[in-house]
Amino acid sequence: MDFRTYGEFWSFYLSQHSKPSTRAWHFAGTACVILCLILSVLLMNGWFLLAAPVLGYGLAWFSHFFIEGNKPATFGHPLWSLRADFHMFWLMLTGKLEKELHRVQEREAG
């Protein structure tokens, strides 16, 4: 799929994460990435930098293949997908994701 803007991609991205458990696995994966980045700096250990994408993508892709039943958006749009992962993480962390899901669904409906 071709997207002209991040907003268009964001709507698609949310549609690919329709199940709460998929979003929970993504949240866990992104939290692991952040933790690995912090630990790599605090402990001056590059292994945590290598572990970050393995953990982050591993948990997220697990949720797509075994829970959501679709192909990760990362395969077709890696940079926008990475941005959207952190965007969704922040909305979940701040308790604003449900409102955003409703907003996007209403906009898509008409």
Image (cartoon, rainbow, N blue to C red):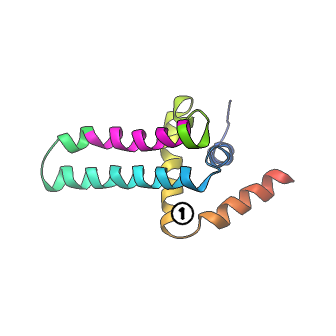
**Residue found at x 53% / y 29%:** 75
Horizontal side of 19 relative to 59 (left or right) equals right
Q: Main secondary structure of the magenta part?
A: helix
Magenta stretch encompasses residue 43? no
For this orientation, the residue located farthest to the bottom is: 95
Residue 70 point in image, percent of width and height = 61, 35
For this orientation, the residue located farthest to the front is: 66
Magenta stretch encompasses residue 56? yes
Residue 99 point in image, percent of width and height = 66, 67
Q: Badge 1, how many Cα within 10 Å: few under 14, some, many 20+?
A: some
Write down the region rendered in magenta: 51-65
**Residue found at x 55% / y 49%:** 22
Residue under label 1: 91
Disc 1 residue type (three-letter)? Leu
Residue 97 point in image, percent of width and height = 60, 63
- Of 41 and 6, the residue lying toward us: 41
Horizontal side of 19 relative to 57 (left or right) equals right
Q: Look at the numbered disc 1 and give the secondary structure of its residue.
A: helix
